[in-house]
């Protein structure tokens, strides 16, 4: 090989290594989280699930079976358990995600965001609040705070249905309105809504407290097993089926049974 060819070959090798290093450095944790979300959603068996009654309810923000978390939540937690990321990465994911997932269902993204929070908290046990901005999303996101274990979660914007679904502990603060079924099957902790709440607030709730600063819709506390629901404004109606616990509206105790 001629000297010029040797030099040229060595130059090309170095150049390729440098390019690969730059590409590696440019690939951020946020990129990894977005890719993981894509992979999880693709792995989820839409073809078989779409035909099921349960899946249809899930996509519409009305999880039917209280005994199980959505399969997507379990799958998301499994995929995220081997990735190291920060609270700031979760916030960035919420801001950037709509650019990549604008055609994805709100229930799918809310479930993945909830998994992001739970896995990070399980690994770090931080007392610092998770900041979840919703301004970038074109539609309300369902299932935020699903099975929440984190100490503090601040959600800013209008939430979809089932915020705080099966919440276990900690404090979720929503700076905005909530859709139907806020705090559904809630087990513990404090769900604080600085706005209005839809129908079926605290549906089959078994523990903890829900506070709504403004008004709530119909069937508040339907199937309530334990806990307190406080509504600062008016309630359209309260539930009637097998209820025990406490409901307060406008400073007046409208229901109590132990």
Image (tube, helix red, strand yellow):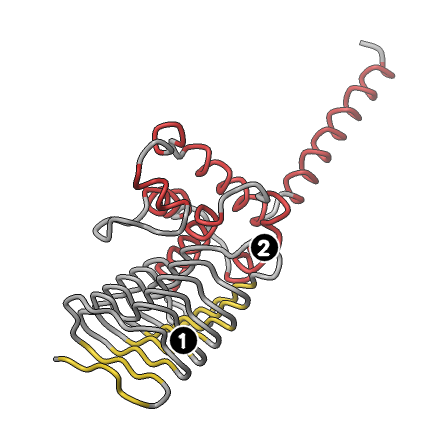
Q: Secondary structure at mark 2?
A: loop
Q: Badge 2 is on which residue?
A: 137
- Picture quadrant of residue 55: top left
Q: Nearer the viewer, residue 163 or 230?
A: 230
Report the quarter where the N terminus lies. top right
Question: Taking 40 as reference, is 220 left or right?
Answer: left
Mark 1 crowd level (few <14, some 14–19, many ≥20, 10 Å Cα):
many
Report the quarter where the C terminus lies. bottom left
Say if 130 sits above or below 19 in the image: below
What whole-number distance in Å separates the C-alpha atoms at marks 1 and 2? 21 Å
Q: Badge 1 is on which residue?
A: 192
Q: Residue at x 44, y 81 (%)?
A: 213
Place of residue 53 in the rendered image (x, y in percent of width and height, measured from the top left): 30, 38
Question: Taking 111 as reference, is 168 left or right?
Answer: left
Place of residue 108 in the rendered image (x, y in percent of width and height, measured from the top left): 45, 46
Q: Nearer the viewer, residue 14 or 100?
A: 100
Q: Secondary structure at mark 1?
A: strand
Name, please, the residue furthest toward the front: 236
């Amino acid at each position: 090989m001629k000297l010029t060819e040797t030099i040229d070959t060595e130059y090309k090798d170095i150049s390729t290594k440098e390019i690969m290093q730059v590409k590696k450095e440019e690939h951020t944790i946020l990129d990894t989280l977005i890719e993981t979300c894509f992979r999880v959603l693709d792995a989820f068996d839409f073809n078989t699930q779409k035909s099921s009654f349960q899946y249809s309810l899930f996509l519409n923000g009305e999880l039917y079976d209280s005994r199980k978390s959505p399969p997507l939540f379990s799958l998301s937690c499994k995929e995220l358990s081997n990735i190291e990321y920060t609270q700031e990465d979760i916030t960035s994911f919420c801001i950037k995600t709509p650019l990549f997932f604008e055609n994805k269902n709100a229930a799918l993204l809310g479930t993945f965001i909830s998994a992001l929070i739970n896995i990070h908290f399980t690994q770090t046990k931080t007392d610092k609040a998770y900041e979840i901005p919703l301004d970038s999303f074109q539609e309300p996101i369902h299932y935020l705070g699903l099975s929440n274990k984190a100490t503090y979660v601040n959600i800013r914007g209008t939430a979809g249905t089932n915020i705080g679904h099966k919440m276990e502990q900690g404090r979720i603060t929503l700076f905005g309105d909530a859709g139907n079924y806020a705090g559904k099957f809630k087990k513990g902790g404090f769900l604080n809504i600085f706005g209005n709440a839809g129908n079926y607030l605290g549906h089959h709730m078994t523990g903890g407290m829900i506070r709504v600063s403004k008004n709530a819709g119909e069937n508040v506390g339907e199937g309530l097993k334990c806990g307190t629901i406080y509504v600062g404004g008016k309630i359209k109606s309260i539930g009637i089926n097998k209820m025990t616990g406490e409901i307060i509206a406008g400073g007046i105790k409208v229901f109590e049974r132990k």
